[in-house]
Amino acid sequence: MTDAPTILVIDNYDSFVYILVQYLGELGAQPVVRRHDEIDLDGIRELDPDGILISPGPGNPDDSGVSMDLLAELGGIRLLDDGEADDKIVAVLDSDTVFDYARDIRHLPEAVTNRLVHYFATYKMQMTGEQENSMEIVGTYGRDEALEVITASMADYVDHFSVPGRHNDG
């Protein structure tokens, strides 16, 4: 028996999952991988992991199986990247033991929101080593607007990529 924390990795069919799993192992965790369409909320409760990591994935949230069922959207950070909209949606696991009380970004401690804003304002500089920042923080917004942004983004995705069987009738 190991004392390593069990981390459930929800695989949204992205090749990056392999790297995430390897890294979790290097950090001393015991990763358990399940595809998003091969486990449900009852299966997750039965597994009783110490933590959950939701992988990135192709497509849109409609195609993410159990992943979206795990999240509680709190709000968003409005960003411009070289003048183009690049909003970030802030969400927590619905059963999060630290932030389970939060149902809107304004419920988070100001220090947490400031940390998120700082991260997204500088993360590309950290990844690329660039000295100039292409990111501009415009502001934050609450859960209701985040849901509107998600809905609009999904419609834009369908329109842009012409997903068969899905149409945005506006």
Image (tube, rainbow, N blue to C red):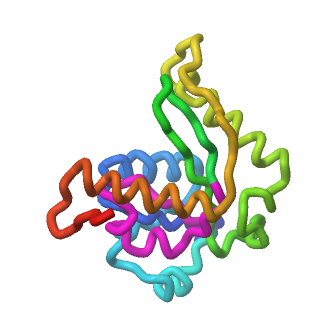
Tell me where residue 67 sits by quadrant: bottom left
Residue at the far front: name it.
Answer: 170
Is 83 covered by the magenta stretch?
no
Q: Is residue 120 above or below residue 107?
A: above
First to last magenta residue range: 51-75
Foreground: 165 or 28? Answer: 165
| Residue drawn where x is 50% and y is 38% of the image | 86
Report the residue at 58% width, 58% height from top.
146
Name the residue at 43% across, 82% down. Answer: 40
Q: In which quadrant of the rendered image does the C terminus lie?
A: bottom left
Place of residue 62 in the rendered image (x, y in percent of width and height, measured from the top left): 35, 68
**Which of 93 and 45 lies nearest the eye of the viewer?**
93
Query: Against 28, is 86 above or below?
Result: above
Relative height, residue 8 to residue 78 (above, below): below
Q: Is residue 5 visible?
A: no
User: What x and y, as percent, mark residue 15?
Assistant: 30, 49
Residue 55: image x %, image y %?
A: 43, 56
| Image position of 21 (left or right of 129) | left
Residue drawn at x 28%, y 63% as measured from the top left: 168
Question: Which quadrant of the view contains residue 7?
Answer: bottom right
Q: How many marks?
A: 0
Asked if the magenta segment contains residue 72, the reply would be yes
